[in-house]
Image: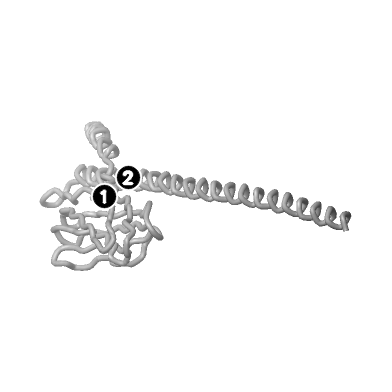
Amino acid sequence: MEGMLSKLLLFLGSLLLLCRIGDGFIVSVDAHNEECFFENVEGGTKFGVTFEVIDGGFLDVDIKITGPDNHVMHESEKESSGKYTFVAPAKGTYTVCFNNERSSMTPKLVMFSIDVGEAPQRAPGAPGEEEVGHTKLEDMIRELSGTLTSVKHEQEYMHVRDKIHRSVNESTNSRVVLWSTFEALVLVLMTVGQVYYLKRFFEVKRVV
């Protein structure tokens, strides 16, 4: 009974982890420039990087993720969005860089987040049955917390993407309306001009 009660208290206390949300940022990367961000991560900890280019040029940017000792963990070019998850092989500072050197004059607006999980913790010595249960429960809560954080970020990015597409659609619709109005005016002017020309032509014929 005490074991079940302790697990319940541990579960209720650990629910605070579910409210932990990775920080989201928006950064402007100027043309011919690079912006880097650093995160200290414990060895064996799961961490992820999610980003999306929300404005500027062709909505693409180069990304590079490096670990301690400048070990390249991921590198890609002309990416519009991405989601990368790693397990830190060693303790140290991990770097995420967004590069816009390929752009001649257009800055890029990048929305991104770096999510770092909880460092793995194990009781010293051989764990008992109760400790094993606690450890499994903690692992499940951490996994659920990470999943909820990923879902929230996906919703944020979908919301941003929806706003971008809506803006593009509204802009396209406005251009179509303006072009249609211009075409209508041209047709009206051409019709008036043709009527006037034909009227003048037949008037001249009658005089002759």
Circle 2 sits on which residue? 149
Q: Nearer the viewer, residue 147 or 73?
A: 73
The amino acid beneath tag 1 is Asp
Crowd class of label 1 (few under 14; some 14 to 19; many from 20; radius 10 Å): many
**Quarter of the figure that contains the N terminus:** top left
First reached walking from the N terminus: tag 1 or tag 2: 1
Residue 110 place in picture, x, y as percent: 32, 53
Q: Indicate the secondary structure of the residue bearing disc 2.
A: helix
Q: Residue furthest front?
A: 208
Crowd class of label 2 (few under 14; some 14 to 19; many from 20; radius 10 Å): some
193 relative to 63 in the view: left or right: right
Q: Indicate the secondary structure of the residue bearing disc 1.
A: strand
Circle 1 sits on which residue? 115
Residue 49 place in picture, x, y as percent: 29, 55
Asked if the residue under mark 2 is in contact with the one under mark 1, i.e. CB atoms within 8 Å, the reply is: yes
Q: To which quarter of the image does residue 64 belong?
A: bottom left
Residue 15, numbered circle: none
Residue at 27%, 47% in the rendered image: 25
Q: Nearer the viewer, residue 97 or 69?
A: 97
Residue 65 place in picture, x, y as percent: 24, 62
Residue 139 place in picture, x, y as percent: 26, 47
Q: Nearer the viewer, residue 176 or 117?
A: 176
**Quarter of the figure that contains the C terminus:** bottom right
Q: Measure the C-alpha gap from mark 1 to mark 2.
A: 8 Å
Q: To which quarter of the image does residue 205 belong?
A: bottom right
Query: Is 52 placed above or below 6 here?
Result: below
Q: Give the colour scheme of this rendering.
A: one colour
Q: Nearer the viewer, residue 99 or 51?
A: 99
